[in-house]
Image (cartoon, helix red, strand yellow):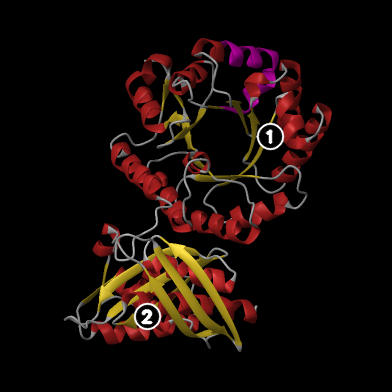
Amino acid sequence: MMDRELVNICDCTLLAAEDHYELSFREKIELCRLIDKLGVSAIDLCPIRQKKTDRLLIKSICSAVKSASIAVPVDLMDEESVRITWEALKEAVSPRLQIAVPVSSVQMEYLFHIKPDTMIRKVEQAVRECRELTPDVEFIARDATRSDPDFLVRLITAAIDAGVSTVTLCDSAGIMMPDEISAWIEQIRKDLPAMNQIVLGFSCRGDLNMSDAGAIAAIRAGARVIKASTCISTAVSLSNIVRILNIRGGSIGVYSKVGVEQIRRITGQVEMICQTSGRKKGAFEQEESQEDEDYLLSRHDTIDEVIHAVEKLGYDLSPEDQQKIWNSFCQTVEKKDSMTLKELDAIIAAEAMQVPPAYHDISYVISTGNQIGAMARMKLMFHNQEIEGIASGDGAIDAAFNSVEQATGRHFELDDFQIRSVTEGREAMGETVVRLRWEGKLYSGRGISTDIVGAGIMAYINAVNKIVYEEDEA
């Protein structure tokens, strides 16, 4: 039996999903956590654009991912990018810095406005800076199939000499036939013997539905890293490529470590996250995660276990607030044996980070019906100043939240909205919990009223007041 070489699968779902879905902070973390369970070698993330939010996201993903390398590109045109990216990435189990640039003459001048010789110098400098921080540095040549062959060889040579460990070639246009990909890679390896010193990766688009065949052709030509996605149709299919390697890998002398048994289940979960992302919840729609319902805390749990559950919900609380949550938890489980994450979330909203209200004295009018859209008019005080907002929305609560945003002049990411009945009967009290995300951090508010719209507004304003208070204290 011939010796077989390992082909690593690098997941690019989150990177590819950027053009297709609007994933929330929490969805991105959950997506990476699921993909890590597959046994991929690395997970590609998007570059840092919003410094505070994106750095926090990368740090959170690094904490959630237990096995795979986390790879983040640096900005070639920003002198601070290498340092900032490394600070966010360095706590990963296996951190990887990437230099990803277009290498075709058209894209170099259009996107970077620089000439080939300047690109070579910048790539070489960036690789050296990254190499001082980590030995795992990847150079990604985007649009490589349309690059001038001589320039591409010079650029890759400079990157290898500067210290990269992986070079990934990209068919960004996705128009090469599989046999053309094989011949192209074989020619590059022939022209550049130094390619034998590093790991060769390959990526291609799937607009012509040939990306999987193209990836196999690249493997035959010597590629040992394939960038693939769990659910994005314009990339190599992770489930297909793993299935092909599992069935036919022996015939071409390669194998993959990705778990075949759980691919269908996990890719299904990832696809569900992507398909439902960005969808607004209706005013009275209660969506409960099965995982949250199955995750129970009991009176036998320690404070460390309770705080772990708090972190699982996405909160980063001070020691003082952690103690408040623990005290309230202990009082609650004296009356009932167990507590779900949804119930813990309500305790956090009620107990953690209670602050003096900057926004107060709220009054509102909501008009809606089955023949007209919802419209909300909101008046409230910001300290001693009266402010007002008028907005429409998809339902009464959506309109109310939009009018608050118009009045305050600020937009907040609605991470979650929960409704539950506190008492029974026609005059039942309704409790709402609103979770807002601002600059990467989670804030929750709680409201109780016989008017469920009013309870929602109270909870929303409660969360906003926490954001304002923390900004003022900073």
Q: Position of residue 452 (x, y in %)?
A: 32, 76
Q: Is residue 156 above or below residue 33?
A: above
Residue 187: name its quadrant. top right
Where is the C terminus found, in terms of image quarters?
Answer: bottom right
Q: Which residues are magenta?
A: 183-201
Q: Is residue 384 magenta?
A: no
Q: Is residue 195 magenta?
A: yes
Q: Is residue 320 above or below residue 160?
A: below
Which residue lies at the image location 45% right of the left edge and 83% below the top edge?
363
Which residue is farthest front? 371
Which residue lies at the image location 36% right of the left edge and 22% below the top edge?
244
Question: Of residues 181 and 454, which is closer to you in this image?
Answer: 454
Q: Position of residue 40 (x, y in %)?
A: 44, 39
Q: CA distance from mark 1 to mark 2?
A: 49 Å
The residue labelled by disc 2 is 447
Where is the N terminus found, in terms of image quarters?
Answer: top left
Q: Is residue 315 above or below residue 128?
A: below
Three-letter residue code for mark 2:
Gly
Residue 50: name its quadrant. bottom right
369 relative position to 457: left or right: left
The residue labelled by disc 1 is 101
Which of the two marks, 1 or 2, is nearer to us in this view? Answer: 2
Mark 2 element type: strand
